Amino acid sequence: MRMRAVRLDELSLLQDIERAAGQCFLDVGMPEIAHDEPFPLGELRRYHQAGLAWVAADDADDPVAYLVADRVDGNLHVEQVSVHPGSARRGLGRALLDHLADHAASEGVPALTLTTFTEVPWNAPYYARCGFRLLDDDQLTPGLREIRRREAAHGLDRWPRACMRRAL
């Protein structure tokens, strides 16, 4: 698999990857998350234009996983990382996170951050294995507090959720 920047003509493929990846939430009793719509094309276009969208591409150069990030309080914040179930368990999520970490380090960014469900095996426990650590509420930056506020307004706090940070 090759990590590369997403191309503009691939944005709808990212939506397909996210929809397929989301289906695993049905297995843990989270149908609302499984059926949540992916980022709209305009939002994905914004990540592309900012140079903060990458894919893992297969041998045919087709995307099978993707990651988009934002700049939040001097760090790079993982907004979404999704792996198509047909390509799962091959280290693609970790490879995308490592790719982002390399990009961030080359820019002198001190850390990666993300928000995640704490009790979903492929969320917080997985990210901990990828070098992220849970943040206490008093460690949240203003930008992370705003992200958590928006997530709560979207109903994501129905399940335990937290912020995590990976120092670079």
Image (cartoon, rainbow, N blue to C red):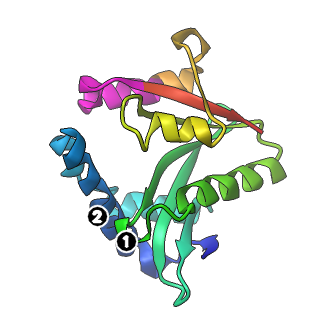
Q: Secondary structure at mark 1?
A: helix
Amino acid under label 1? Answer: Gly
Tag shown at residue 118: none
Q: Residue at x 60, y 59 (%)?
A: 96
In the rendered image, residue 156 lying in the magenta stretch gets the answer yes
For the residues carrying marks 1 and 2, which lies nearer the camera in this image?
1
| Relative vertical location of residue 82 with respect to residue 105 in this rendering, above or below | below
User: Mark 1 — residue?
Assistant: 86
Q: Quadrant of residue 95?
A: bottom right
Q: Earlier in the sequence, mark 1 or mark 2?
A: 2
| Relative vertical location of residue 159 with respect to residue 53 in this rendering, above or below | above
Amino acid under label 2? Answer: Ala
Query: Would residue 89 be found to the left or right of residue 85 on screen?
Result: right
Span colored in magenta: 146-161
| Relative vertical location of residue 106 with respect to residue 133 in this rendering, above or below | below
Mark 1 and mark 2 in contact? Answer it, CB < 8 Å. yes
Q: Secondary structure at mark 2?
A: helix
User: Mark 2 — residue?
Assistant: 20
The answer to whether one can see residue 21 in this image is yes
Q: Quadrant of residue 166?
A: top right
Q: Position of residue 118 (x, y in %)?
A: 41, 28
Q: Residue at x 54, y 45 (%)?
A: 78
Q: Main secondary structure of the magenta part?
A: helix
Determine the residue located farthest toward the bottom in the rendered image: 60
Q: Position of residue 141 (x, y in %)?
A: 59, 21
In the rendered image, residue 47 lying in the magenta stretch gets the answer no
Please give the count of numbered marks on the rendered protein. 2
The answer to whether one can see residue 6 in this image is no
